[in-house]
Image (spheres, helix red, strand yellow):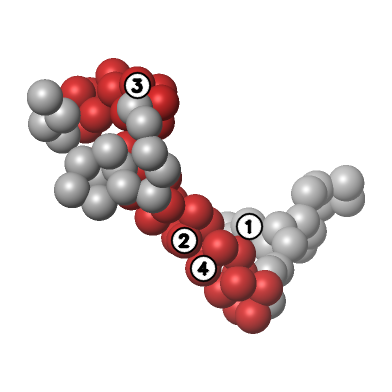
Amino acid sequence: MSQVSAAPVAGAPSVPTIPFGQLASWALFFGLLGTLVLFFVSTDQGAVSLLSGTAIHEWVHDGRHLLGYPCH
């Protein structure tokens, strides 16, 4: 049985490493951004509202139905 050597091939792409400190800050940023988007899609123009009027409700109306949120 012969073994295949694991020597790197010239010109092969390398996988970059990302330090955990940088990854954590980006994960926190996108987590908060996702939470804000979820707020506007699910609850804005309901019992809790940041802005008056129905503009945000109309912009996300179809998304509410797609995600199963009641809005009528």
Assess disc 1: are there few (<14), some (14-19) or many (≥20) residues with their C-alpha within 10 Å of its C-alpha. Answer: few
Residue type indicated by callout 1? Val
Q: Residues within 10 Å of mark 3 (few under 14, many from 20)?
A: few
Label 2, on which residue? 32
Disc 4 or 3, which lies upstream in sequence?
4
Separation (CA) of disc 1 from disc 3: 60 Å
What kind of element bears circle 1? loop
Q: Is residue 47 above or below residue 67?
A: below
| Residue denoted by label 1 | 4
**Image-quadrant location for residue 26:** bottom right
Q: Kindly give the residue lying farthest to the front in the view shown.
A: 52
Which amino acid type is marked by label 2? Leu
The structure residue drawn at horizontal position 25% and vertical position 44%, both measured from the top left corner, is: 43
Q: Position of residue 1 (x, y in %)?
A: 51, 58
> As rendered, which of 25 and 16 lies closer to the eye?
25
Q: Secondary structure at mark 3?
A: helix
Sequence-wise first label, 1 or 4: 1
Question: Seen in the image, is 23 located left or right of residue 65?
Answer: right
User: Residue 4 falls in which quadrant of the image?
Assistant: bottom right
Residue that numbered label 3 is attached to: 58
Q: Which corner quadrant holds the C terminus?
A: top left
* Residue at mark 4: 28
Of badges 3 and 2, the one in the foreground is: 3
